[in-house]
Every structure is written in structure tokens, then in C-alpha cells.
Amino acid sequence: MNVKELRQLFPILDQQVNGKPLVYLDSAATSQKPLSVIEAIDNYYRQYNSNVHRGVHTLGTKATDAYEGAREKVRRFIGAASIEEIIFTRGTTTAINLVAASYGRANVREGDEIVITYMEHHSNIIPWQQVARQTGATLKYIPLQPDGTIRLADVEQTVTSNTKIVAVMHVSNVLGTINPVKEIAQIAHKNGAVVVVDGAQSTPHMKVNVQDIDCDFYAFSGHKMCGPTGIGVLYGKKRLLEQMEPVEFGGEMIDFVGLYESTWKELPWKFEGGTPIIAGAIGLGAAIDFLEQIGLDYIAEHEHRLAQYALEQLSTIDGLTIYGPKERAGLVTFNIDGVHPHDVATVLDAEGIAVRAGHHCAQPLMKWLNVTATARASFYLYNTEEEIDALVSALKKTKEYFSYVF
Amino acid sequence: MSFNSHLDTLYRQVIMDHYKNPRNRGVLEGEHVDINMNNPTCGDRIHLTLKVEDGKIVDAKFEGEGCSISMSSASMMTEAIKGKTIEEALKLSTIFSDMMQGKDYDDSIDLGDIEALQGVSKFPARIKCATLAWKAMEKGLHEQQD
């Protein structure tokens, strides 16, 4: 399937924005959805909407099969050992918060350390700030190289025998850096710490195998990988999840409820209190089918080509600064001298081009880059070289426009 | 040279002039009202200082970081409220808020340069940029009134 045919599977892409063909370069914020995902959710609501795990009736069984079937698809997709290790959450943020609130508070003590990096998204910073504050632990940062990469020597230096948790993003949503999470996990384990990987920007774009990485926890969101919003996944090693207490209590997650005491269901359901995100999980399952049909290796290669092409083309614009390393995932973050990124994004929008402008939920990284905001173009399987050409030409116009109005 | 007339309704010459040459940039010394405000969704921030004597704003300065709309709006706001009473400044803020929401606004008061920001109402994603400085001013004056 070529990219033209592939684009036809995404109905939203065929439209005009401000009189120009839509050029959607904001997939790192959220990806667009193929018809098969939209239809899977539609079918669930039209044909077998029902609660799961309790109905004796036919629809209840169908819904349960679809929901649990999605869990098996996720297990296979990320190479987990068993479905007991796959917990559905609202998204990456909820997944990391679950680890912080359950594993973090139970295992981190005063004097311990939690290690993260300067490039983390707020969702992989604030939960750890909270654990550190509540337990009296210290939060430490692995420094970055000038090109926005991490040196393993710095990881070795920062992680000590007092470190209990190392939390790191697999791929940076700003720099595009692909972090050596497998090596970081080895260093963490050598020091007796667990590793939490934020996979929000990796899982949609490359083959991920949690057993190969040997991470203890891995979190990601459905909506960035062609799935719906409101569904995400926490992978955790069974041995750790078994020791952990749930953070939400109520229906669905219980085994036996007494007047004064209750017991929990087995994994993974003890972490899924309340009616689960049934349509979301089914949509995510359909997204995984879709991505596997296209092929993660093809997607990674396509995006790599686009990112390298974008780097090459954008560097022809005078006064444009690009952040992050040359070898990167499918996104480019930049600034134009003298034009604020919001103004850049507004001019691009007038040309039908959607990019993100702002701090990208990474204020500590913005501080490290010594900027308050940046513009970001991010790519996915449906983007084309022509769209990057449109971006470059619109950016040249932006520069001219602002030099004229000044 | 203009390649997009839609954009010209937003980026008016007078806005760009205030962005390039901001009026009242800096921090007041001595006794003053001090307000810090930011827009958490985008990172724009403003530090506004106001000198209020006998219910009247006798001086105003701002510093901050942000886009052309937020910084020019701050520059225009400080110009507009100098010499006004607290009540007059708050009234102006209400008029500005109505203007941003595309509502009919009280046109009995001469808005001067501020009128140029009217085009922002056609760019919903940018309204928060324009109102940041005004929200800071309102907050400071309300604290002063309490």
C-alpha cells in the first residue's frame, strides 16, 4: 500500500482548512484515526454494547470477549509474557501515576532517590515530585548532552545504590531523542532500582518489546497510535504487580467484599476498578490490528525518512534553529529568530498546516534549552514529503511576512 | 507584501509596533502592586507592576515573555490605564473582554491603539494571549480594592 492509498483510510485528512488542503503535522499530540478504528467503536455501540465480566447474557459475553481480546492484542504487540501484566488505564499519565501512587509510596523511603531526566514530559516528572515530597526521597536528574541525548556514563553517575526508581521516556516528544532504555534498565537493575519507561512517543512508531528492554513498567496511550482517546496501558512485571496495592477501589476490582474488609481480584483486574474503558480498549485493539497490518518496521522507516528530509529542508531556512539530535524519531522542533512560535503556528494554520506551539508539557526541558516555547512538526505513517515541502514553503512565507510587518 | 489577507486582520501594523517597541517595559520601584501571571497552556508570562495613589493608577510597567499578541496587548494595556482610576481601568478591562469574545462593546470610550486587537476575536486560539495582561491588571486592582 502506498502512502496515497493509506491516506484514504483516514477520512479526516481529506479536508480543507482555511481554504487550503489540511497538512496535519501534530501526531505527537494525537494521531488521526483510520476508518477501521472508528468502525470498531461504532460497531461496539451499535451491536454489542454491554458491561463486561458480569453479564450472563449474550451481549455481555461478546463485550467481554472483545475487551479481553484487546488485552491479548496489547500483550502480543509489546511482547509481554502474560495478559496479567497488561492493565488498561486512561492513558500514559494515569499509568505512571498508578506506579507512583502504588509502587512508589510503598517502596520509596526517606533518603532514597528517584532518578529522571531533564527531557521528561510533565507526566513523568510530577508524579515523582509528589512521591519524593511524600516520602522524603530525593529527585535527581540525569543531565543532557548539548544535542539533547543522554550519555550512559551520566546514567551510571546519577543512579546509585540509594536509587529505588529510574523513570525515563523512550522517545522525547520535543527533541525526538531515542533513549537507550535497555541499557538504562541494566544500570538501574545493577543498583537495585526498578525502571519505569514512558512509551507514549515510542509505541506508536516503532517495534517495542518490553521483555527485551527488561523494563519493570512501561506506559503508553492509545490516542497517539491511531486509537481513541481515554485508553492507555500500563505494562508491569507480574512479580511487581502482585505485590502492589490497587489505587482505585470499588466495583470490578474485588474478589470478596465483607462489612469491614475486602479482597481483590487477581491480576490484571485488581487495578481496573469501576466499569472499564470498554469501547476505548476495543478501539485500541483495532488500532493495533491496523498498525500490525501496515507493519511497525515500515512505519519506523517511513518516519525516519520524513524526519531526515525535514531536517535537511528546514536547515535551508536562515535564522531557523532546530533542537535535538540528527538521529531522531519522526518529529522536528524548531524556532524562527524573532518570531514567537505561537505566531508561527497561527501563520501556518492560515496555510492549512497544523503544528504544535508551546512548551510541549516539558517546562524543565524548555528551561534547559533556554527558550519559553518552540514550534513542533511531528510525523506519522500518513505524512508525505510533499507536506514537508508545504511546511518549508509556509515557513519561508512566515519569515517574509514578519519581516514585512515589522 | 501580503500573502494572506486573513492574517492581516490579526497582525495589524500597530500591534507589531507595540511588539517591537513595547511601551512601559520594566519593573516599578518603590511601593507598588506586583502581579505575576502566566498562561500555563503555552508558557507566556507577565510581570506587571502598578503604582496606585488615591484610587488612581499613576504608573504601570510590565515585563514578560510571549508572542506578539500577548506582549503588544500588555504594552497597550499599560498605556491605556495610566492616569485612570481603578474603576475606569476595570471598566476598560470589561470592554476589552467583550471585544475579545466578539460581543458588542461599549464604544463611548476611545480605545486608541487597543482597537487594533479587535481582529484577535476571529482567532479563538489566540484570545488567551491577548487577555493575559488584562487579567493580571484585574487581579492586581481587585487585590488593591480588598
Image (cartoon, coloured by chain):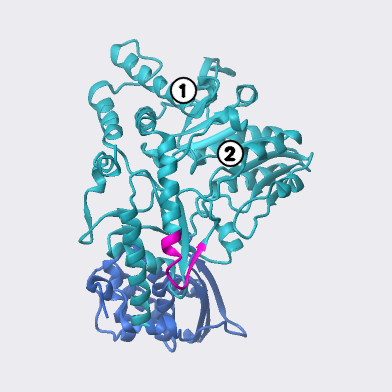
Chain colours: A cyan, B blue
For image coordinates 35% across by 76% down, the residue present is: A400
Query: Up-down: is B143 above or below A297?
Result: below
Kindly indicate the quadrant of the structure image that contains residue A57: top left
* SS at badge 2: strand
Q: Chain of mark 2?
A: A
For image coordinates 61% across by 85% down, the residue present is: B29
Query: Up-down: is A349 above or below A141?
Result: below
Identity of the residue furthest to the top in this view: A56
Q: Position of residue A283 (x, y in %)?
A: 35, 31
Q: Please name which of the two marks, 1 or 2, marks the residue nearer to the observer.
A: 2
Residue flagged by tag 2: what amino acid is it? Val
Q: Nearer the viewer, residue A270 or A288?
A: A288
Residue flagged by tag 1: what amino acid is it? Gly
> What residue span does the magenta drawing correspond to?
A312-322
Query: Up-down: is A217 above or below A270?
Result: below
> Where does label 2 land, which residue?
A197
Kindly indicate the quadrant of the structure image that contains residue B76: bottom left
